[in-house]
Image (spheres, rainbow, N blue to C red):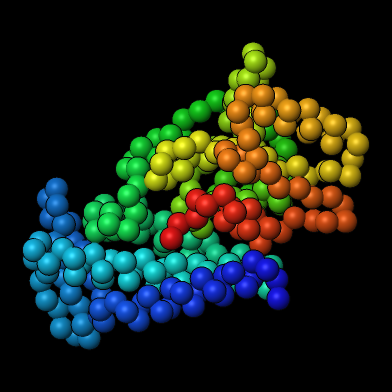
């Protein structure tokens, strides 16, 4: 079995066990001025949840999150098995909407000590991007973002499915020279900046020499593989896949729990 596929099934099993440990029924969250009101829906019975029962409401919110995370993992498995992204975007959007819902965000804080969502959105949307060859941005990701290759679509999918904000080809000045790393990530908990370079033509000598020269500059400026730099590779005989992107992300330890 594909290594990352095995990991996904293990994660799925872990999620299903946690869901069974949480209360039955569902949470309903309604805006109430600047705050929110919570209701417990069990079968057809709806019951108000007071603020003193925050812990109970938080468990129901966690259950909702895990159910959407489960749907996303099943969609990721479908991507690997069938190379189909049809269900992936719908599942990703549902999970993203939940994480951005201020009513749920308040309840999920015990599980995610996150940077405020608005701060992450503002960071993600305002930066100097690579002005070179915009006509080459021909690959549309399920998230709606445009990138330059199918491999970068897989990276976008891995980041989006884990609600990790990123900047694509964001300007980075080192030693007075402008670089444009493929992806600049912001850790949603610590705020740490992490770079991701995908080196897609490693069987081309000129390309490989330029790539290694860039990595030397990165290293000299404390951008280190395994610490704050993710490196992925491919060649003509070893194409990059979505499971490769998921594995690379999991190895640096910033996937959503």
Going 32% across and 49% down the picture, which residue do you hit?
A: 113
Q: Position of residue 176 (x, y in %)?
A: 64, 13
* Up-down relation of residue 101 to residue 169 (above or below): below
Quadrant where the N terminus sits is bottom right
Instruction: Give the camera-side residue of 135 and 70.
Output: 70
Task: State how many labels appear.
Answer: 0
> Is 145 on the left or on the right of 210, as rendered?
left
At horizontal 67% and vertical 48% (from top left) the residue drawn is: 152
Seen as rendered, the residue at the extreme right is 205
Left or right, 3 with reference to 142: right
Between 23 and 43, which is closer to the camera in this rendering? Answer: 23
In the displayed structure, would residue 89 be above or below residue 140? below
Residue 40 seen:
yes
Left or right: residue 97 compared with residue 27:
right
Residue at 64 percent across and 71 percent down: it is 5
The C terminus: image quadrant: bottom left
Residue 205 placement: quadrant: top right
């Amino acid at each position: 079995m594909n290594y990352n596929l095995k990991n996904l099934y293990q994660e799925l099993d872990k999620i299903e066990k946690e869901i069974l440990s949480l209360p039955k029924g569902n949470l309903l969250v309604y805006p109430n001025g600047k705050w929110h009101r919570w209701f417990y829906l069990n079968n057809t019975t709806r019951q108000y949840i007071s603020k003193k029962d925050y812990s109970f409401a938080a468990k129901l919110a966690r259950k909702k999150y895990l159910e959407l995370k489960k749907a996303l993992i099943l969609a990721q498995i479908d991507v690997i098995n069938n190379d189909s992204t049809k269900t992936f975007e719908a599942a990703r959007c549902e999970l993203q909407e939940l994480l951005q819902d201020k009513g749920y965000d308040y309840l999920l804080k015990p599980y995610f000590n996150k940077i405020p969502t608005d701060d992450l959105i503002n960071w993600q949307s305002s930066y100097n991007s690579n002005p070179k060859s915009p006509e080459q941005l021909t690959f549309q990701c399920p998230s709606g973002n445009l990138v330059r290759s199918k491999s970068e679509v897989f990276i976008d999918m891995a980041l989006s499915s884990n609600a990790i904000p990123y900047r694509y080809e964001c300007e980075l000045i080192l030693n007075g020279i402008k670089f444009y790393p493929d992806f600049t990530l912001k850790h949603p908990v610590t705020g740490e900046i992490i770079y991701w370079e995908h080196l897609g033509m490693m069987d081309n000598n000129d390309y490989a020499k330029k790539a290694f020269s860039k990595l030397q500059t990165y290293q000299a400026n404390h951008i280190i593989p395994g610490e704050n730099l993710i490196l992925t590779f491919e060649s003509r005989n070893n194409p990059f896949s979505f499971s490769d992107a998921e594995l690379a992300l999991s190895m640096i330890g910033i996937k959503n729990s």
